[in-house]
Image (spheres, rainbow, N blue to C red):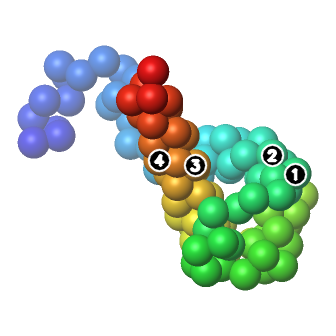
Amino acid sequence: MRSALLDLWPPKLRKPRSKGLFDVPWLEALRPLANSLLKERQLHVVERGFVGRTSFLSRQERLSAGLDCNEPQLRRVDLRELWLRNRGQSRLSEAGLEAA
């Protein structure tokens, strides 16, 4: 089908390209997050026993430095941390609304 419709596509889409650089935007977004998590005293994923504090902080430091840290797994842990934080904040704001 690609060859049948080739002349209908814009020139930029006619050339196949690699999807190998998909992780670059993730890493650029995770580095500032890793730096902010290193400064936090309360980490929900640690308090709930998902990860150990030492391992988590060590891997955040490695990510910040651009070193190998099993980034796909760390990305999931970081996303869970953010989800837990947002969940807690929304509960606090709901409780504040109910009290008012």
Which residue position is annotated with label 1? Answer: 39
52 in relation to 42, above or below: below
Residue ID at (83%, 58%): 41
Q: Name the residue type under label 1.
A: Lys
Q: Residues within 10 Å of mark 1 (few under 14, many from 20)?
A: few
Given the image, on which type of amino acid does mark 2 rest? Ser
- Find out whether the residues at labels 2 and 1 contact each other: C-beta distance under 8 Å: yes
**Mark positioned earlier in the residue sequence (3 or 2):** 2
- What residue would you read off at disc 2? 36
Query: What residue appears at the point 63 percent right and 63 percent down from the top-left corner?
Result: 44
Residue positioned 72% across, 81% down in the render = 52
Which of 49/65 is in front? 49
> For the residue carrying disc 2, how many other residues have a C-alpha within 10 Å: few (<14), some (14-19), or many (20+)?
few
| Mark nearer the viewer, 2 or 4 | 4
Instruction: Please tell me whether mark 4 or mark 1 is closer to you in this view.
Output: 4
Amino acid at circle 4: Arg
**Rendered image: mark on residue 87:** 4
Q: Marks 3 and 2, Cα distance to the nearest angstrom?
A: 13 Å
Distance in Å between CA atoms under marks 4 and 1: 20 Å
Q: Secondary structure at mark 2?
A: helix
For label 1, the SS is helix
